[in-house]
Amino acid sequence: MNINAEIDKPLFQQIKEGIEDAILSGAFPEESQIPSITEISVNYKINPATALKGINLLVENNIVYKKRGLGMFVCKGAVNRLMENRRNEFYNKFVLSLVLEAKRLKLCEKDIKNMIERGFKNEH
């Protein structure tokens, strides 16, 4: 997980997204323990309240849960929920704006499909 105080994204959001990425990559499988608030705050030299705020977002979204006295764990079904959320975000953030710009440029669906296929072939 990378935390960068120099970018515009709040640190608590970076914590949330970093743990989500780790869950999606399999680094934290469902029902496994994630680092504690203390571990996160010490490792990344951030205020524990900031780390807690990021973790609380995951709790609110039913991605992690607390086992009293043991720590925080990844919820069963978290990967599917995260994938669905990310797909919806991808659609709203990228696809809708792509379609709007394509219409402004008078590109048809086939043109866009060809560009996307070209992009997959030329990926780096």
Image (tube, rainbow, N blue to C red):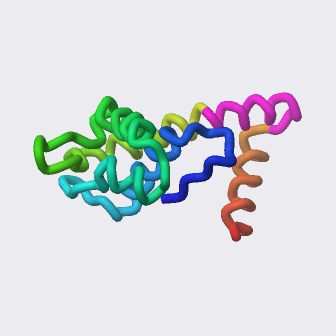
Viewer-nearest residue: 58 or 79: 58
The residue shown at (22%, 56%) is 33
Q: Using the image, determine if residue 62 lies above or below residue 124.
A: above
The residue shown at (74%, 54%) is 114
- Is residue 9 within the magenta segment? no
Residue 72: x and y in percent read 23, 47
Residue 57: x and y in percent read 38, 33
Q: Which residues are magenta?
A: 93-107
Answer yes or no: is residue 79 visible.
Answer: no
The residue shown at (78%, 38%) is 108
In the picture, residue 91 is in which quadrant? Answer: top right
Answer yes or no: is residue 4 visible.
Answer: yes
Q: Is residue 111 left or right of residue 113?
A: right
Tag count:
0
- Looking at the rendered image, the quarter that the C terminus falls into is bottom right
Residue 9: x and y in percent read 61, 39
The residue shown at (48%, 47%) is 46
Q: Using the image, determine if residue 36 lies above or below residue 28.
A: above
Q: Is residue 32 left or right of residue 25?
A: left
Viewer-nearest residue: 81 or 30: 30
Q: Is residue 55 left or right of residue 12?
A: left
Q: Residue furthest right?
A: 105
Magenta: main secondary structure equals helix
Q: Is residue 115 left or right of residue 19?
A: right
Residue 55: x and y in percent read 35, 40
Q: Using the image, determine if residue 58 lies above or below residue 33.
A: above
